Image: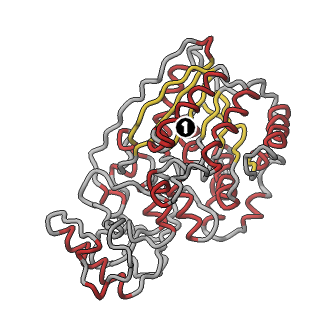
Amino acid sequence: MNNRDFTFIDLFAGAGGLSEGFVANGGFIPVAHVEMNPHAAMTLKTRTCYYYLRENNRLEEYRSYIRGEITRDELFARMPVGMLDTVINREISDETTNEIFNSIDGILQNANIQNVDIIIGGPPCQAYSLIGRAKDPDNMRNDPRNFLYRQYIRFLTHYRPRMFIFENVPGILTAGNGETFRNIIREFNEAGYTVEHRIIDASDFGVLQRRKRVIIVGWQNQLQLRYPEFERVEFHATVNDILEDLVQLERATVNNTYVLEPNNYLIESGIRCHDDILTHHECRFHNPRDVEIYRRVITAWNDGHRRLRYTDLPEELCTHKNRSAFLDRYKVVAADLQCSHTMVAHISKDGHYFIHPDLEQGRSLSVREAARVQSFPDNYFFEGPRAAKFVQIGNAVPPLMAKGLAQGIRQIIENL
């Protein structure tokens, strides 16, 4: 059995949910993260600090930062020279790819790393998502993001990893009447990789959320491998288990206080440890009209799990002219079920689709609650303003799901 560590590059890394699962699984070392969004890139740098300080028994310095006792610059200054340069805050495009190659090649040379074992990541999904296509009059056919997979292939060609994981929304299978996906598979094959794909649900890995994703796994043709067997993980929990230990919030408030000890799910999933410091438990302001709508939809849900449609509301509460589409725009997070509905980045806009189930609070989810739905650990600190944090969380691969993917990949690659 090969027990060595494996190296990986994370492309279109976002806030690092996919990478987090690989690092948390153990045995995977990130060479570089490439991400264009400056807030997400800063989050990745902060997470890099967390792992370095934890490995060197200096975690109290990280805690000092998230408590606000030292600045981010002071935190970053405590890292070894060049460590944070592994987070490359650049858009991946024809104009930038060679420059990114040069940066990663330099990282590999300085670290005396000979090979990149795995590439992970997935381009932005908006061009493939069913919602995005429904909103676009041209069905996203001319969106340049349709072709970002070719940039991914350029990295495969340059670094020749033995395996890769390409993640995206199920809508990628039907984009362009299926032609887009057929082109992706063909071009992966032409690059020298055998590929297979499955639709996988995050709930199969212990995430308390229904979130289906297409997971393409590829390997060099000569390796004659197989698609990994991803082990199903079951927790006896409900969504309330990720809500109950957090203090009630008034609208537009922040209160980073735990009110209960962590329950079994929080501990077993790794979302909360006994010595964690709660951050990001902050919610947005809601106007009186929205608060009244929230009261009605929460009451309906508690009365036999009824979902109110927008057209079920009194006329005086309806301000949208569109009465034929997106009628479920107000939706309660189901506390008493095993899984929430899918977390999306739109939570950064208004929060109506992710209403807290507690009638007394009458608000949408806090940043930390949204992060927990996605299975991010409480020690994961997101940089940027509140809306930017919501975007990072909504776009992420759930770390628990990513950890399961990493375990399946390791079972194959360590025997090569």
Residue depicted at 37% across the width and 88% down the height: 288
Instruction: Give the side of residue 301 with respect to residue 141, left or right.
Output: left
Q: Nearer the viewer, residue 380 or 121?
A: 121
Residue depicted at 40% across the width and 49% down the height: 267
Q: Is residue 11 above or below residue 250?
A: above
For label 1, the SS is: helix
Q: Which residue is mark 1?
A: 180
| Residue 138 drawn at (x, y percent) | 53, 55
Instruction: Give the side of residue 129 with respect to residue 141, left or right.
Output: left
Number of marks in picture: 1
* Way the structure is coloured: secondary structure
Residue depicted at 61% across the width and 71% down the height: 385
The amino acid pointed to by label 1 is Thr
The image quadrant where one finds the N terminus is top right
| Residue 27 drawn at (x, y percent) | 60, 30
Q: Nearer the viewer, residue 382 or 193?
A: 193
Q: Is residue 337 above or below residue 147?
A: below
10 Å neighbourhood of mark 1: few (<14), some, or many (≥20)? some
Instruction: Give the side of residue 58 with respect to residue 323, left or right.
Output: right
Q: Nearer the viewer, residue 334 or 171?
A: 171
| Residue 172 drawn at (x, y percent) | 49, 41
| Residue 108 drawn at (x, y percent) | 80, 33
Q: Nearer the viewer, residue 399 or 150?
A: 150
Q: Quadrant of residue 361?
A: bottom left
Residue depicted at 55% across the width and 43% down the height: 18
